[in-house]
Amino acid sequence: MGSETAQGLPEDALRELADRLQGALIMPSIDGYDQVRHVFNAMIDRRPALIIRCAGPEDVVQGVNFARTHALPLSMKGGGHSVAGSAVCDGGVMLDLSSMKRVRVDPEQRIAVADAGLTLAELDRATQAHGLATPLGVVSVTGIAGLTLGGGIGWLNGKYGLSCDNVLAAEIVVADGQLLTASAEQHQDLFWAIRGGGGNFGIVTSFTYRLHPVDTILGGGVSYPAEQAHAALKHYHAFARDAPDEVSTSASIGRDAGGRAVVSAAVCYCGPLEEGERVVRPLREFGPPVAGDFVPMPYAAMQTGADGGFPLGRRHYWKAGFLRDLTDDAIATLLRFAADIPSPYSGIGLQQMTGVASRVDPTATAFAHRARHYDFLVLSQWDDPADDDRNITWTRALFEAMRPHLEDAVYVNDLNDEREEGHDRIRSAYGANYERLATIKSAYDPSNLFRINHNIKPA
């Protein structure tokens, strides 16, 4: 390691840390440092003092202890898919769990024990080999850890709930370096908090998930004529509002080559296929659609369907909230702004939370926003840094115009960092559960070591 030091740390402390690790200690001068610190959002350009490529929970313990002892900022990277870039810290310790990818599926008990470095695609691949699945998100390159800790809204939420609703236990390293098991039997307060409270309470190294029989589903999407955009959104809203639990839906609004707002609707139906054909008929016949269809497909194909729209290397800026009702005024606002989208890669999404996920008691887990509503997301992405101002200005303007229609709530996984959002927005992400979360935070992390996130300050 030579005479290399980090943040004024003595060389012997770094050498001792390296000797204790099963994985690798990566310093800024080492080849591969830049590759590891880069994340999904190209607007994030932070430089950790050191990166620990964790081989297992023991390395996570070493990293937590080192950061606490030397008063260094601490961040954790799983999939690195957060728009806020909270996987990477400046001048501190970054724990990279992306090499931790063990997964064990018990098809008889219908459970999976999954390391926190897995992506959605990797966990789906293991469970689908047995015709099983647990609810995850909608972009398969996302890491399971951040998604689950924030709630996890995906294609199975209507029938089987959110990702966090299907966590049976978790192994978690807390601020004092202990590796704990959080479950309904052990550390129940911590178990409650990590199901929607984000990464505020420690670093989860593995999850135990409940699995469900999911194999072939009826899925896909359709796009409607631009001249029917307003009517198409009203039709979609009526369909989604009354759809059975087996249906989870989303709508997207973009701009065509002629500058007109266009609407698409996507569906995942996880019930009997013949019944699914009857259920989706209203979406298939309206318009009629100019492209797309709903067809039987493997569930994993539905999970990867959106991946092409999220390549690495683009710049991202998002604004979000929960939307209960698609009124005529809300639709008119969305379509007016959609016609002026500055980037061809950007869009407006309405991912429905419905069915089982919407009926859970808001206090049963830390995820408080239980209702039949939409995760409204203005998802701006572009390539050239010179276009930052134009895209950010458009995103903020649309969000402000939509504020009167939104609830005082937001999906924590959609948030930018606190400097951009403000702490009131962070509180809104946790809703009525914030004070209880703050009390639990004070028990497990009184010094707020785990603060590079959508932070809950200790009570």
Image (cartoon, rainbow, N blue to C red):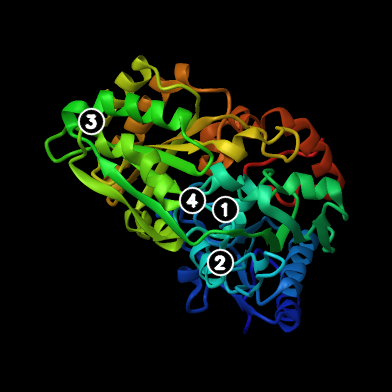
Tag 4, which secondary structure?
loop
Alpha carbon distance from label 2 to label 4: 18 Å
Alpha carbon distance from label 4 to label 3: 36 Å
Question: What residue is shown with label 1?
Answer: 135
Labels 1 and 3: the sequence-earlier one: 1
Q: Amino acid at mark 1?
A: Pro
Tag 3, which secondary structure?
loop
Question: What residue is shown with label 4?
Answer: 270
Residue at horizontal 32 percent and vertical 58 percent from the top? 308
Give the answer, above or below, for where 21 lies relative to 238. Answer: below
User: Mark 4 or mark 1: which is in front?
Assistant: 4
Q: Amino acid at mark 2?
A: Leu
Q: Amino acid at mark 4?
A: Cys
Question: What residue is shown with label 3?
Answer: 340
Question: Does the residue at mark 1 contact the one at mark 3 (Cβ under 8 Å)?
Answer: no
Q: Position of residue 238 (x, y in %)?
A: 40, 26
User: Mark 2 or mark 3: which is in front?
Assistant: 2
